[in-house]
Amino acid sequence: MKVVLFCGGLGMRMRDGVTNAPKPMAMIGDRPLMWHVMRYYAHYGHRDFVLCLGYGASVVKDFFLNYDETRSNDFVLSGGGTGDIELFKTDISDWRITFVDTGLHSEIGERLRRVRRFVQDEEMFLANYADVFTDAPLPDMISRFAASDTAVSLLAVPPQSSHHVVDVDDSGLITHVVPMRELRQWENGGYFVLRPEIFDHLGEGEDLVGDAIPRLVERRKVLAYPYKGYWCPADTVKERAQLEEAYHRGDCPWMVWDPERSGTPRTVAVAG
């Protein structure tokens, strides 16, 4: 199944004043954020990627054009520094990656429209932000969507804020305090599964979640996959730093392809 990744935004909240690389190229360990997202999909057998590029497109292209398998794989080196390298395994040798310029300031929906020709003949396809991690069971997400007649499915996660919500009466007294994560509400967590029908409801220059999905909600054509397990965005420098710290602790639930780091049993890849 093809995987569309949105990786062309300016990512202003991620700026650290040091680098101008696009946000999905911020490093977690030896690999950028978007590599971790792609590796998640590849683990489940989905290795045909369409990258919606924009800001910093050349950085993304250069990373894959000059990809170094030795950074994340064990290998044997024979003959010194200029000798032969024998890899025990590879990351991306069986990946197919399509690079598409979708505009510097395009909304997510417009980026999707600009890669329509690559997915419009598919029965279903996957799409996601290139900077959000989860360990959600992708095969189950896909099978639930396939069994429905909806046009879009998305991962629904609890509110991520650590703040508390308060109820206030007319006199100004607080009558109730509750953590936001305990509210009976859900956030859009990405990890979309879509049918090409989505393009019938997506106008030029529009957003996917802000414009097209509300129209489909009215038609009862949007499915949620509620998930209270691991989900973590990397929208800010602080969030990226927390992911980096988790990586170096070896506490990486999103790395479902690496049982040692993720703490999950090894599973067999299944293509959908």
Image (tube, rainbow, N blue to C red):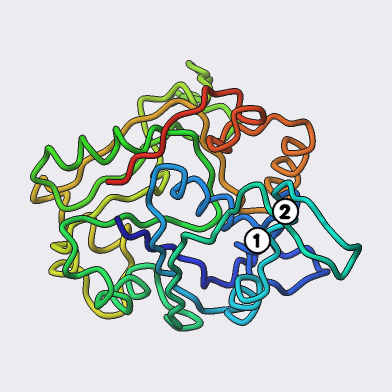
Q: Where is residue 191 in the image (x, y as percent from the top left)?
A: 38, 48
In which quarter of the view is residue 189 placed?
A: top left
Relative to 4, is 104 above or below?
A: below
Dot 1 falls on a residue whose secondary structure is: helix
Looking at numbered disc 1 in the image, what kind of residue is underneath it? Arg
Q: Residue at x 79, y 37 (%)?
A: 248
Q: Which amino acid does label 2 sit on?
A: Val
Residue 13, label in figure? 1
Crowding near the residue tagged with mark 2, few <14, some 14–19, many ≥20 C-alpha atoms within 10 Å: some
Q: Which of 72 and 193 is in front in this view?
A: 72
What residue sits 73% from the left and 38% below the top?
A: 247
Residue situated in front as seen by the camera: 225 or 34:
34
Seen from this angle, which residue lies furthest right? 80
Asked where in the image residue 44 lies, by quadrant, the reply is top left
33 lies above or below 118 = above
Q: On the picture, is 186 further left or further right than 134?
A: left
Check disc 2 and report its element: helix, strand or loop. Answer: helix
Is the residue under label 2 in contact with that under label 1 (CB below 8 Å)?
yes
Q: Residue 237, which numbered label?
A: 2
Q: Where is residue 179 in the image (x, y as percent from the top left)?
A: 53, 23
Left or right for 112, reference 197: right
Residue at horizontal 62 percent and vertical 82 percent from the top? 58
Residue at the limit of the structure toward the front, as seen here:
79
Q: Which residue is drawn at 46% across and 24% down?
A: 167
Relative placement, left or right, of 185 versus 103 is: left
Q: Where is residue 125 in the image (x, y as percent from the top left)?
A: 27, 57
Picture layout, residue 19 above or below residue 79: below
Counting from the top left corner in percent of width and height, residue 72 is at 71, 50
